[in-house]
Image (spheres, grey):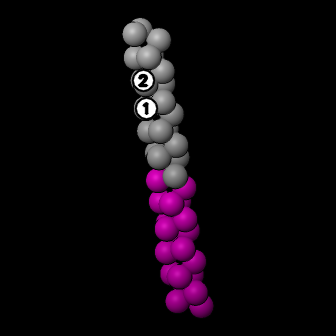
């Protein structure tokens, strides 16, 4: 029973970590595209 609980917690933590990583990457891409658009607009 203890092993099952630890495994479930580990899988949950891995899932949250992967989701957070994708979110940060997406946010970085959004900020980058806004910066590029602003740069093109001023030239």
Query: Is mark 1 in CB contact (under 8 Å) with mark 2?
Result: yes
- Viewport quadrant of the C terminus: bottom right
- Which is more toward the observer, 25 or 11? 11
Percent position of residue 14, x then y: 51, 33
38 in relation to 26, above or below: below
**Secondary structure beneath label 2:** helix
- Which is more toward the observer, 4 or 13? 4
- Which is more toward the observer, 9 or 31? 9
Q: Residue furthest top?
A: 2
Would you call the spot at circle 1 few (<14 residues within 10 Å), some (14-19), or many (20 or more)?
few
Residue 14 drawn in magenta = no
Would you call the spot at circle 2 few (<14 residues within 10 Å), some (14-19), or many (20 or more)?
few
Q: Residue at x 49, y 68 (%)?
A: 30
For residue 32, side relative to residue 19 (left or right):
right
Q: Residue furthest front?
A: 1
Q: Residue at x 53, y 82 (%)?
A: 37
Q: Residue at x 48, y 30 (%)?
A: 11
Residue 30 drawn in magenta = yes
Mark 2 sits on what residue?
9
Q: Residue at x 47, y 39 (%)?
A: 15
5 in relation to 16, above or below: above
User: Residue 9 falls in which quadrant of the image?
Assistant: top left
Percent position of residue 2, x then y: 41, 8
Q: How many marks?
A: 2
Rounded to the nearest angstrom, the CA distance separating label 1 from label 2 is 5 Å
Say the numbered circle drawn on residue 4: none
Mark 1 sits on what residue?
12
Percent position of residue 12, x then y: 43, 32
**Secondary structure beneath label 1:** helix
- Viewport quadrant of the N terminus: top left
Q: Main secondary structure of the magenta part?
A: helix
Residue range corresponding to the magenta coloring: 23-43
């Amino acid at each position: 029973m203890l092993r099952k609980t630890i495994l479930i917690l580990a899988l949950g933590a891995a899932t949250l970590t992967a989701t957070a990583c994708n979110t940060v990457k997406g946010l970085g891409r959004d900020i980058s595209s806004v910066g590029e658009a602003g740069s093109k607009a001023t030239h």
